Amino acid sequence: MCVTAQASRSLIVSSNKTFSALAEIFGNPVAVAARVDRLVHHAEVFVLKGDSYRLRGKREEVLTGSKTR
């Protein structure tokens, strides 16, 4: 699927796992390395660091005992 769309379309992939953690999830580090290599070839990778807005809201709910929305 990604190979056919690669030349003519944009593809956004989002994950809360690092590329190295994918080997643990899928169990085959060689296959994961090949797939990640194919996915990021000619790609722009953005790494966002910091607290999640969703989790920050949940943390506030737990601390105050009320919903923030």
Image (cartoon, grey):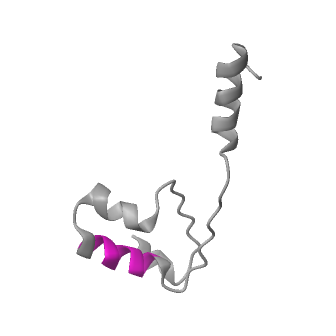
The answer to whether residue 3 of the structure is visible from this angle is no
Q: Residue furthest front?
A: 63
Q: Is residue 8 above or below residue 24?
A: below
- Residue at image location 46% in from the left, 63% down from the top: 18
Q: Residue 11 at x, y = what percent?
A: 55, 69
- Looking at the rendering, which quadrant does residue 27 occupy? bottom left
- Looking at the rendering, which quadrant does residue 4 occupy? bottom left
Q: State which quarter of the image contains the N terminus.
A: bottom left
Q: State which quarter of the image contains the C terminus.
A: top right
Provide the residue span drawn in magenta: 31-39
- Residue at image location 70% in from the left, 31% down from the top: 57
Q: Residue 66 at x, y = what percent?
A: 72, 14
Q: Is 3 left or right of 52, judged from the image as shown?
A: left
The answer to whether residue 55 of the structure is visible from this angle is yes
Q: Is residue 55 above or below residue 51?
A: above
Q: Residue 5 at x, y = what percent?
A: 48, 76
Q: Residue furthest top?
A: 65
Secondary structure character of the magenta stretch overall: helix
Q: Is residue 21 above or below residue 31?
A: above
Is residue 54 covered in magenta?
no
Q: How many marks?
A: 0
Q: Is residue 42 above or below residue 54?
A: below
Task: From the viewer's side, name the closer residue of 4 and 57.
Answer: 57
Is residue 34 covered in magenta?
yes
Q: Residue 38 at x, y = what percent?
A: 40, 80
Q: Is 8 left or right of 22, judged from the image as shown?
A: right
Q: Is 65 left or right of 16, judged from the image as shown?
A: right
